[in-house]
Amino acid sequence: MPNINASKQSFNTLIILIGAGLLLYDFIAKPNEIYFKIAGLVILMFGLYKSTQQWTSDNKTDDNENSTEEDDKPKNDEA
């Protein structure tokens, strides 16, 4: 079972929600400035980037175990 860092996941989720909130505000309130949309997209993408980095670091051991199991299986060369 991978060691999951809940505090980092919560922080990344908060960043994603802030970015999504800014985008929703821009779509609902329709302000004249485009800065809310730009900031929302940048914050949302940063949160997604950080969360995927966290997910891959949490699941490193699973990938290594799966690749060794696939290498041990005999290959079927029937054509």
Image (tube, rainbow, N blue to C red):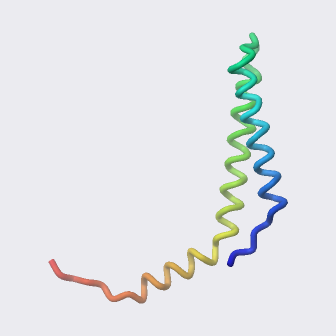
At a point 57% along the width and 79% down the height, the residue shown is 64
Q: Residue furthest top?
A: 32
Residue 20: % across, % down? 72, 35
The picture quadrant where one finds residue 36 is top right
In the picture provided, is 11 more to the left or to the right than 40? right
At a point 73% along the width and 31% down the height, the residue shown is 40
All told, the count of numbered labels is: 0
The picture quadrant where one finds residue 79 is bottom left
At a point 66% along the width and 56% down the height, the residue shown is 52
Q: Looking at the picture, tell me which residue is in the foreground, 36 or 18.
A: 18
Q: Is residue 52 above or below residue 71?
A: above
Q: Quick one: quadrant of the N terminus?
A: bottom right
Residue 16: % across, % down? 74, 43
In the picture provided, is 42 more to the left or to the right than 7? left
Q: Is residue 61 above or below residue 30?
A: below
Q: Is residue 5 above or below residue 23?
A: below
Q: Residue furthest front?
A: 28
Q: Residue furthest left?
A: 79
Residue 42: % across, % down? 72, 35
In the picture provided, is 56 more to the left or to the right than 71? right
Q: Is residue 27 above or below residue 78?
A: above
